[in-house]
Image (cartoon, rainbow, N blue to C red):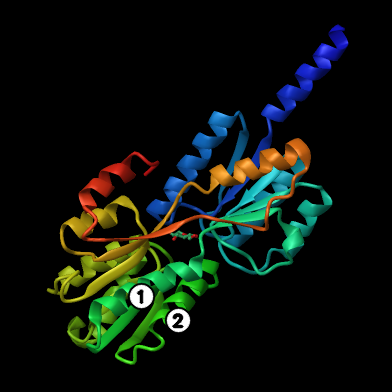
Amino acid sequence: GAAALAGLMTTTALAADMTVGFSQIGSESGWRAAETTLTKQQAEERGIDLKFADAQQKQENQIKAIRSFIAQGVDAILLAPVVATGWDQVLEEAKEAEIPVVLLDRTIDAPDDLYLTAVTSDLVHEGNVAGQWLADKVGDEQCNVVELQGTTGSSPAIDRKKGFEQAIADHDNIKIVRSQTGDFTRTKGKEVMESFLKAENGGKDICALYAHNDDMAVGAIQAIKEAGLKPGEDILVVSIDAVPDIFQAMANGEANATVELTPNMAGPAFDALEKYKADGTEPPKWIQTESKLYTQADDPMKVYEEKKNLGY
Ligand code: GZL
């Protein structure tokens, strides 16, 4: 009768109107901004009520946001964890409240019963692909590398460093001579690259830059040009993310290679959450996204145009 129909309607409406709290790191890079755009688009398309909180890259703000989502009684939480440690307490509180947490694009050092799943690329593999590209490029020539690390203590900074070092381990001619964090931003990437150039004979002793993301590489390219050197030639440039601007740089001959990271982490995350909510299916603890190497040989301006339609 009418009561049953009303009940059915309510259930259907409830399932469609999942409320999800999203604790986002900030907008430190073009990639992160695209991830936010796509997450909001996906929520809109799926009729998910998204509560968005930007932490300005501060863990304490992320913890506050998670506590607020718990107080609001959201159905699920998305967390892009700025660093890998310090989450156990607040994730225990979410577990107590029976609110599933899905990690986006970074992992954490915590028991895996504290989150439903992690949607990330293989961050070690990305570093590996970057290191392997450089090894293939320089052959047996001596190559002193400077490294711009991501945010200190974040899983991408730790894993991308590890992967790169693995790839160059048996190439004695390739050496990382300077390594410092540029916090994934253009500004800091430029600043730190300026100090590397000064410290390395005006950059003449630097063969290559490995940046943990394209934004730091783009900042560094500016610094290399201001030092009177040719990025992409005098100093090879390899980085990760595959944001549009790195393809512009490749087209200009100022960058050489990048490893693609998809900004669409929310699609797999929402799929897993909807299924979990509908029938309790537990997803695997890791949902891995694909990585792909792009070089100057891959028609950079065509890729630039394609990327422009992808939330960037
Ligand atoms: C990696 C992601 C990184 C991007 C950067 O999965 O966490 O954070 O590579 C962003 O652009 O700052």
Mark 2 Cα within 10 Å, few/some/many (few <14, many 20+)? some
Residue 97 or residue 103, whichever sits in front: 103
| Displayed quadrant of residue 223 | bottom left
Q: Position of residue 145 (x, y in %)?
A: 30, 82
Query: In terms of secondary structure, where does tag 1 sit?
Result: helix
Q: Which residue is mark 1?
A: 132
Q: Which residue is mark 2?
A: 166
- Amino acid tagged 1: Gln
- Amino acid tagged 2: Gln
Residue 177 or residue 271, whichever sits in front: 271
| Displayed quadrant of residue 266 | top right
User: Does 292 sit left or right of 221 as displayed?
Assistant: right
Determine the residue located farthest toward the left in the rendered image: 228
Mark 1 Cα within 10 Å, few/some/many (few <14, many 20+)? some
Q: Quadrant of the C terminus?
A: top left
Residue 7 or residue 271, whichever sits in front: 271
User: Does 42 sit left or right of 172 as displayed?
Assistant: right
Q: Position of residue 232 (x, y in %)?
A: 19, 69
Numbered tag placed on residue 180 in the rendering: none
| Disc nearer the start of the sequence (1/2) | 1
Determine the residue located farthest toward the top in the rendered image: 1
The CB of the residue at mark 2 lies under 8 Å from ligand 1:
no
- Above or below residue 273? Residue 115 is below
| Displayed quadrant of residue 2 | top right
